[in-house]
Image: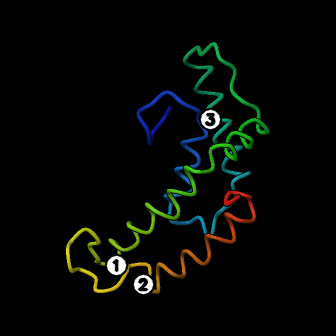
């Protein structure tokens, strides 16, 4: 059930990584719709494999997402920027590749400026 982490943990971690790493958080941060679809698929899968644990309800799933919000925040503000720079042909691991911080790149500034208000509105930066 986990596609990001090889650990036994909450299914919400998958969702949080998904929201943080898709690169579309600024345009499609409709977590209610995606969380509902994910929960439906999770419940179906748990039933099919005969899981004795009951799946969470939508309120429990949202509360768990908020409790583990650090995963989305890290993914959106640390991992995704590295991917964005790679997409722009910048290797941030190569010494001397950038004379200035990659945080000054216009595309990255635009992404961060659009993501921060969304995360703040959800209370994820508290």
Q: Residue furthest left?
A: 95
105 to 84, vertically: above or below: below
In 3D space, how far apart are the residues under numbered discs 3 and 2 (Cα atoms)? 39 Å
* Foreground of the two, 96 or 46: 96
Residue 119 percent location from the top left of the image: 67, 63
Mark 3 — residue?
A: 41
Could you tell me which secondary element the residue under label 3 belongs to? Answer: helix
- Residues at badges 3 and 2 in contact (C-beta under 8 Å)? no
Could you tell me which secondary element the residue under label 2 belongs to? Answer: loop
* Image quarter of residue 4: top left
Residue 117 percent location from the top left of the image: 69, 71
Mark 2 — residue?
A: 105
How many labels were placed on the picture? 3
Within 10 angstroms of label 2, few (less than 14), some, or many (20 or more) residues?
Answer: few
In 3D space, how far apart are the residues under numbered discs 2 and 1 (Cα atoms)? 10 Å
- Residues at badges 2 and 1 in contact (C-beta under 8 Å)? yes
The numbered mark at residue 22 is none
In 3D space, how far apart are the residues under numbered discs 1 and 3 (Cα atoms)? 35 Å
Q: Residue at x 74, y 59 (%)?
A: 122
* Foreground of the two, 72 or 21: 72
Q: Residue at x 41, y 71 (%)?
A: 84
Q: Residue at x 63, y 70 (%)?
A: 116
Could you tell me which secondary element the residue under label 1 belongs to? Answer: loop
**Chain-order first, disc 1 or disc 3:** 3
């Amino acid at each position: 059930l986990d596609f990001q982490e090889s650990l036994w943990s909450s299914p919400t971690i998958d969702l949080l990584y998904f929201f943080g790493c898709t690169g579309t958080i600024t345009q499609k941060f409709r977590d209610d719709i995606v969380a509902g679809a994910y929960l439906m698929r999770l419940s179906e899968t748990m039933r099919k494999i005969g899981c004795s644990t009951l799946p969470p309800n939508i309120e429990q799933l949202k509360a768990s997402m908020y409790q583990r919000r650090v995963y989305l925040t890290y993914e959106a503000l640390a991992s995704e920027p590295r991917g964005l720079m790679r997409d722009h042909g910048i290797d941030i691991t190569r010494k001397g590749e950038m004379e200035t911080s990659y945080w000054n790149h216009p595309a990255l500034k635009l992404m961060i400026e659009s993501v921060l208000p969304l995360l703040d509105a959800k209370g994820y930066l508290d």
